[in-house]
Image (cartoon, rainbow, N blue to C red):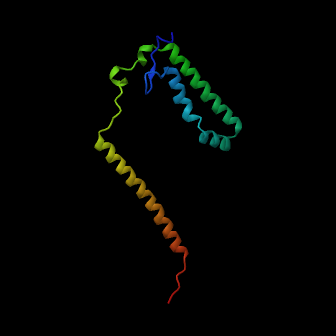
Amino acid sequence: MRNSLGSYRCHTDAQRIEPGAALVLLMAGPATNAATITMIAKVMGRKSLAGYLGSIISGALLFGFMINNFLPGSWFILPEHITSHEHEILHGWLSIGSGIILVLLIMNGYNEIIQKETRRERKGQCFPRE
């Protein structure tokens, strides 16, 4: 049955993952990161955290099992043109332009922070009159 189900191909042909395992990783991964667990433990308590983790883990495993065993494997076979190794998704000019815009936006954000700090420091200083 394992071979009859389709499998996702990762960046090399040697690495494969079953659809149910992929779903488990996609469902449980973001929901169980350290920041989320810490926030839930502090805000809602340890009992709520245990219920949260139990529901995420059991739900992910249940749906992963159901996908592997009850859905047709043909749904998860990727077409050949998708699995080919073509790494350049964006054109070169679009990729470079997007990178430049991202850097400019980050610099603008830092500039605003620096200006706010400078204004705050100027308001707090007393300049002697002559």
| 98 lies above or below 116 | above
Q: Position of residue 112 (x, y in %)?
A: 44, 61
Q: Nearer the viewer, residue 74 or 52?
A: 74
- 66 vs 80, left or right, is right
Q: Position of residue 105 (x, y in %)?
A: 39, 54
Residue lying farthest to the bottom in this orientation: 130
Residue at 57% across, 25% down: 60
Residue at 46% across, 19% down: 7
| 3 lies above or below 10 | above
- 63 vs 46, left or right, is left
Residue at 52% across, 69% down: 120
Q: Quadrant of residue 110?
A: bottom left
- 93 vs 121, left or right, is left
All told, the count of numbered labels is 0
Q: Position of residue 97 (x, y in %)?
A: 32, 47
Residue at 61% across, 40% down: 34
